[in-house]
Amino acid sequence: MSNLTLNRAKEILSKHTTESHLFVHAAAVSAAMGALAEHFNADKEHWAAIGYLHDVDFEKFPEEHCQHVRELLEPEGIDEEDIKTIISHGYGLTGADIKPETDCQKSLFAVDELTGIVHAYALMRPEKMEGMSVKSLKKKFKDKRFAAKCNREVIQRGADDLGMDLSLLMELCIKGMTERADELEL
């Protein structure tokens, strides 16, 4: 059983991160992971904590992202399985060598980039997250110039690895982020 709670994840991330946009991204991924945990009948708090902590080494080591997770989290007493899950979201992208195998790992891989598109879309809507539809999000997703830094191939690969239709993945991401819209200032 993991000892990682959302409060503990927030405490640890604040030791290694100062940039506000990284905290917003952490909260967005955390929210999406909570919704995916519900979908998979898993521990929502635990998955949300994993999502919150997933970029723990990004600010200090942007060029070596995912390669310093273990050295930052082992001294905090974080379980090996949680460390592996966090490292796995960089598989094939950052030199991380742990392939996402579990539903939690695959979910983290899938939503990391997708939350960026959802967030960018929410910022341009007067009603922000409220009432966002999968259909309208898909239009933005198909426009490669919109949120251009968010890798659509990674998102699609993540959905495929989960055996999940992209529409369902988007729906869950929207659901999770809508639940925590206040925290995301959306």
Image (tube, rainbow, N blue to C red):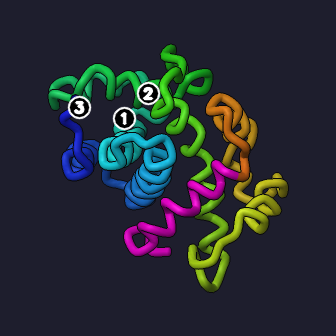
Q: Amino acid at mark 3?
A: Ser
Is label 3 in contact with label 2 (beta carbons under 8 Å)? Answer: no
Q: Earlier in the sequence, mark 3 or mark 1?
A: 3
CA neighbours of label 3 inside 10 A, class few (<14), some (14 to 19), many (20+) = few
CA neighbours of label 1 inside 10 A, class few (<14), some (14 to 19), many (20+) = many
162 shown above or below 126:
above
Q: CA distance from mark 2 to mark 1?
A: 7 Å
Q: Where residue 77 appears, x then y in whole percent?
A: 15, 27
In the image as oriented, which residue stretches furthest toward the front? 41
The secondary structure type at the circle numbered 3 is: loop
Pointer 3: what residue? 2
Residue 159 within the segment the image draws in magenta? no
Is label 2 in contact with label 1 (beta carbons under 8 Å)? Answer: yes
* Left or right: where 62 falls relative to 43: right
The secondary structure type at the circle numbered 2 is: loop
Residue 175 within the segment the image draws in magenta? yes
Pointer 1: what residue? 57
Q: Quadrant of residue 119?
A: bottom right
Q: Main secondary structure of the magenta part?
A: helix
Pointer 2: what residue? 66
Q: Which residues lie in the magenta part?
A: 168-186
Q: Where residue 159 appears, x then y in whole percent?
A: 67, 38
* Left or right: where 155 falls relative to 4: right
